């Protein structure tokens, strides 16, 4: 049987309630969702990759159809290695769509058998981004309402 496997790639620095919602809402569409935490050597992350992977594993520990992994390189190459035919992306704003559409079209050219699937953020999550949460944390604010309970900054 051909499993419907989706890769949800991102830096997830940190993983937000918006990310959690996208994954949770996608579980009815796919047999397996792989949350793939990308290693980007050109980006200065606030949290190390092991901590981000551990947090996300804890968030989805009761969901056997969710796998959490880390990777380097092209997302389409990772999809090929994992046998995934779908790339899952969340959209918060219209500008997200423009950016993600371009990436999706390039991914389609690189690996035609992979489809990009967009899920719209819930309205209450549309303003939440990892960038904003990192800024709150760097400035001593309390970002706990924007992340799953398993994500703790102590």
Image (cartoon, rainbow, N blue to C red):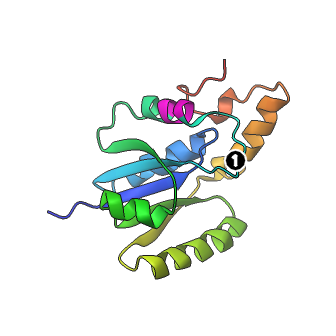
Q: Does residue 22 lie above or below 60 as drawn?
A: below
**Residue position for label 1:** 129
Residue 136 in the magenta stretch? The answer is no
Q: Identify the residue at image location x=77%, y=30%.
A: 137
State the image coordinates of residue 59 (x, y, percent, origin top left): 46, 32
State the image coordinates of residue 139 (x, y, percent, origin top left): 85, 29
Q: Is residue 60 visible?
A: yes
Name the residue at the top extreme. 154
Q: Identify the residue at image location x=67%, y=52%.
A: 126
State the image coordinates of residue 24 (x, y, percent, origin top left): 43, 46
* Relative depth, front residue between 40 and 113: 40
* Relative depth, front residue between 51 and 18: 51
Of the 4 image quadrants, the one containing the C terminus is: top right
Of the 4 image quadrants, the one containing the N terminus is: bottom left
Q: Identify the residue at image location x=69%, y=69%.
A: 94
Is 21 on the left-hand or right-hand side of 136?
A: left
* Relative depth, front residue between 32 and 48: 48
Is 84 on the left-hand or right-hand side of 11?
A: left
Q: Is residue 29 visible?
A: no
**Helix, strand or loop at mark 1:** loop
Q: Which residues are magenta?
A: 50-55
Is 94 on the left-hand or right-hand side of 19?
A: right
Name the residue at the left extreme. 1
- Crowd around label 1: few <14 · some 14–19 · many ≥20 (10 Å): some
Residue 53 in the magenta stretch? The answer is yes
Q: Quadrant of residue 65?
A: top left
Q: Main secondary structure of the magenta part?
A: helix
Q: Does residue 12 lie above or below 96 as drawn?
A: above
State the image coordinates of residue 147 (x, y, percent, origin top left): 61, 34
Name the residue at the right extreme. 139
């Amino acid at each position: 049987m051909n499993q419907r496997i989706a890769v949800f790639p991102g830096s997830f620095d940190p993983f937000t309630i918006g990310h959690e919602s996208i994954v949770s809402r996608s579980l009815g569409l796919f047999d397996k969702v792989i949350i793939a935490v990308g290693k980007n050597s050109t980006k200065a992350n606030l949290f190390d990759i092991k901590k981000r992977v551990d947090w996300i594993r804890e968030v989805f520990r009761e969901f056997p159809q969710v796998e959490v992994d880390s990777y380097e390189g092209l997302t389409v190459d990772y999809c090929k290695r994992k046998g995934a035919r779908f790339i899952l992306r969340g959209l918060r704003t219209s500008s997200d769509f423009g950016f993600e559409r371009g990436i999706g079209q390039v991914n389609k050219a690189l690996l035609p058998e992979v489809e990009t699937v967009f899920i719209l953020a819930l309205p209450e999550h549309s303003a939440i981004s990892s960038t904003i949460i990192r800024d709150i944390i760097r400035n001593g604010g309390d970002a706990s309402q924007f992340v799953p309970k398993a994500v703790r900054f102590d």
